Amino acid sequence: MTKPLGFEKPLGMRDYLPDLLAKQRFVEEKLNTCMKRWGYQEILTPTLEYYDTVGDASATLDNKLFKLLDRQGRTLVLRPDVTAPIARVASSLLKDEPRPLRLMYNTNVFRAQQNEAGRNAEFIQSGVELIGDATVEADAEVIALAVASLQAAGLTNFKIAIGHVDFMEGLLEETVDSEDQREKLKERLHTSDYVGFRQDVEALSIAEDQKARLHGILKLRGGVEKLADAEALTINGRARKAVRNLQQLWGALQAYEVTEHILFDLNLLSSMNYYTGILFEGYAANQGWPVCGGGRYDQLLSRFGVDNPSTGFAIKMDRLLQSSELEAPQEQRKIYIRYDQECRTEAIQKATDLRQDSIVIIGTQAPTEHYDAIIDLRGGETYV
């Protein structure tokens, strides 16, 4: 007999209890204020989208999508990310708006999990999209805004690691002929399997100097000086152009005065396959997983019929809350009014008056928690 589902939740779903939710709302408010002051306008897209449009355009793996059928038999998905839905809106309802578009969001996304393993199937993302600007200035603005957003959310000790899709793609094209072998090497780097990467490089049938170039990739994480090391590994091609792009980005980030939070990681790869250029991840000091991630996606909107080079980032709220030192303020007084049937009307009226600037709870029992003031109407007493 199947066990009745009394208190269980669907796999990967969670409950937000009052204290945690209060902190989340407070942090969301800080993020929204920061992003709006940079000129970004809030947008909200539907929870349900068509699989053939947003579901297909999303970089989320198909087995991670929550799928449903509508009454017409069309396949729907629960929103797996926010970038693809915003790309749909920018290419349709906002197609005639002046570019660049600056849009921000704070909403939930859904990705199915095969087992619990501490991973949420529903989680909150807060982020921005800068649509219609192909310049390095746009990349710098988005990264600087990511820094400002994390600071507004209460993080002080964090780093933004920056890489470039074309560096890795270009260098592998220069050294490894087999596409299958290139994909295998990228997977090793994406999963941080550096031992496996070295073993796979040694097993390649290529010249020793080419192997040395590939081994050199693993040393390209650190300060701006790593860009010179990266350039030395390249020839005049796709990879070198990517390094020059990163050098230009560094100059722009210096102007924003955020370089103390910046490091370069030329090993950086993303599971989101729509990224086309600069990409980045933000790491808090006490987190082993990135609290935010983003980058340039110049071809995504063309899937909806509009050629708009774009860039953006998303903050993972659950990870941010674990690192943020902010606490929701308790600015209003908290008052308890105790009453009995004879003074019920008086208690309700008094509570209504006091709720103009205080939190007021009424009850017939003695209070069981701390209050700034307690009013006992049964005896006409007020005490703190």
Image: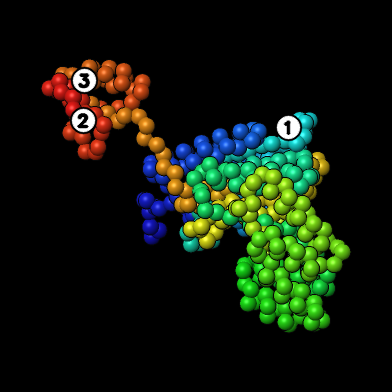
Whether residue 333 is visible to the viewer of this picture, yes or no, is yes
Quadrant showing the N terminus: bottom left
What amino acid type should be assigned to the residue bearing mark 3? Answer: Arg
**Measured Cα–Cα span from mark 3 to mark 2:** 21 Å
Disc 2: CA contacts within 10 A as few (<14), some (14-19) or many (>=20)? few
Rendered view: 243 above or below 15: below
Of helix, strand and loop, which one carries label 3? helix
Task: Please give the label number shown on residue 384.
Answer: 2
> Which of the 4 quarters of the picture holds residue 151?
top right
Rendered view: 154 above or below 277: above
> Which of the 4 quarters of the picture holds residue 17?
top left
Q: Residue at x 12, y 22 (%)?
A: 379
In this view of the protein, which residue sits in the foreground, 63 or 36?
Answer: 36
How far across and how far down the image is residue 80, in percent?
A: 61, 49
> Which of the 4 quarters of the picture holds residue 334?
top left
Image depth: mark 3 or mark 2 in front: 2
Task: Please give the label number shown on residue 93.
Answer: 1
Q: Residue at x 65, y 77 (%)?
A: 196
In this view of the protein, which residue sits in the foreground, 9 or 290?
Answer: 290
What amino acid type should be assigned to the residue bearing mark 1? Answer: Leu
Q: Earlier in the sequence, mark 1 or mark 3?
A: 1
How far across and how far down the image is residue 366, in percent?
A: 17, 33
Q: Earlier in the sequence, mark 1 or mark 2?
A: 1
Location of mark 3 (residue): 344
- Left or right, 369 with reference to 320: left
